[in-house]
Image (spheres, rainbow, N blue to C red):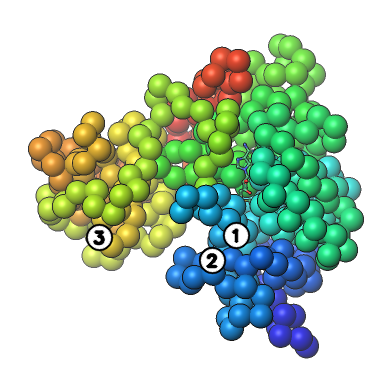
Amino acid sequence: MTEGAALRARLVDLLREDGGLTRDDLARAFATVPRELFLADGFHAHDTGLLRPGDEGFLAGAYRNDALVTKFDDGRPVSSSSQPSLMALMIEELGVTAGMRVLEIGAGTGYNAALMSALGAEVTSVDVQPDVAARAAAALRATGVTGARVLVGDGYLGWPGGAPYDRVMVTVGVTGISPHWLAQLVPGGQIVAPVAHAGNNPVLRVWTRPAEGRAEPGWPAQAEIWAGGVCGAGFMAAGGPLGAGYPWAHPAPVRTPDWATPAPAEPARWDRALSGLRYHDLWFAVGTWDSRATSAPFDGGTGCVLLDETRAGGAAIRADGAILAAGGQGATYASDAGILVDRWADLGMPGIERWRATLVLAGDPREPVYVPRTWSLAG
Ligand SMILES: C[S@@+](CC[C@H](N)C(=O)[O-])C[C@H]1O[C@@H](n2cnc3c(N)ncnc32)[C@H](O)[C@@H]1O
């Protein structure tokens, strides 16, 4: 077995253990598609500098279960290969199978398109950056993939030339769902997308009533589209209409390392800190209840905060349920944060998959997107 094949086999084991990978055909896709060939110009992982083909650690790094950044602009990551466990989960959630036509928004390296193509899907993948799209197309050619094509364009418009699609897979953080994707979807077609929520981009699944049941052909009426949580996630943000702001959006994440110097305000609620996944469940719930919730750095990491208007204070929620306060209004914010954490605990700590939202049109009226408006717990 080659070193690449051994690393792929190990990645498959890891993704199975992680729980996101259950399908055998998808396991075979991960075991055969060579991720390193989609990283031909090198990548940065969160703890490495640039690793190029031939560098020590390149091949092993290419098979880490991590997002690998392939392009920076002004020090900001603008393209990457997403985390494999997240791709597995999104592909399974969408139920991509042989013969389906899939529209992917955000081609990036082309690796995810290659995985879906290996399942027998016919993939149309769109990326807004011409150099990124060209590199992805070259990688698909180099690996002999014929069932996926990469096109340059703003994903907001979808790609009418390939419609209708059975599935839409969005691999870039968006503030809402483009009406064009809905118009290009077959009746009963499905979408998964990482939609901005409280400073993160959790993956949501979108449902619409079949076209024949709609008030009008094309764009569905607002009451006919809704979304549900799939899993917590972080994605780089899309530009253009897909990144539009709207009045009830949460504040943008705080990126500066010195957000505030928070001080303990309420003690730990639980002996053991929540796992990463459960903390994201709490974070998601807090975001559904409070429009001040976002992401900020504290305690050497990043977590959920209620941010005050100065963006330099508020309250931070720790994974053990303790609350930290910062800034002039810290005490009030900490009390509000504590109430939200208790509310989540009193409800039995619901997971992200329990939440449903109605979607409404927002953003630029000439190029609107459907964004979550009112969240409620299902079941
Ligand atoms: C996380 S990467 C996608 C990962 C990719 N699916 C893979 O397998 O490597 C996100 C990509 O979305 C692209 N993007 C950002 N805004 C976009 C937009 N409005 N339309 C289409 N692509 C966009 C970026 O250029 C970037 O390459």
First in sequence, mark 3 or 2: give its number: 2
Give coordinates of residue 22: x percent, y percent: 68, 63
Among all residues in the image, which is located at the extreme front?
74
Disc 3/disc 2 C-alpha distance (Å): 24 Å
Residue labelled with disc 3: 299
Where is the N terminus found, in terms of image quarters? bottom right
Q: Amino acid at mark 1?
A: Thr
Give coordinates of residue 341: x percent, y percent: 27, 45
The verdict on label 1 being within 8 Å of ligand 1 is: yes
Q: Residue at x 75, y 45 (%)?
A: 125
Q: Residue at x 16, y 52 (%)?
A: 261
Q: Amino acid at mark 2?
A: His
Occupied quadrant, residue 17:
bottom right
Q: Secondary structure at mark 3?
A: loop
Residue 83 falls left or right of residue 299: right
Of residues 214 and 349, which is closer to you in this image? Answer: 214
Residue 41 falls left or right of residue 77: right
Label 3 or label 1, whichever lies nearer to me, is 1
Q: Which mark is residue 101?
A: none
Q: Residues within 10 Å of mark 3 (few under 14, many from 20)?
A: few
Give coordinates of residue 138: x percent, y percent: 80, 58
Depicted 363 relative to depicted 31: above or below? above
- Discs 2, 1 touching: Cβ within 8 Å: yes
Disc 3/disc 1 C-alpha distance (Å): 28 Å
Q: Residues within 10 Å of mark 2 (few under 14, many from 20)?
A: many
First in sequence, mark 2 or 1: give its number: 2
Residue labelled with disc 1: 70
Q: Amino acid at mark 3?
A: Asp
Q: Which mark is residue 44?
A: 2
Q: Is residue 169 visible?
A: no
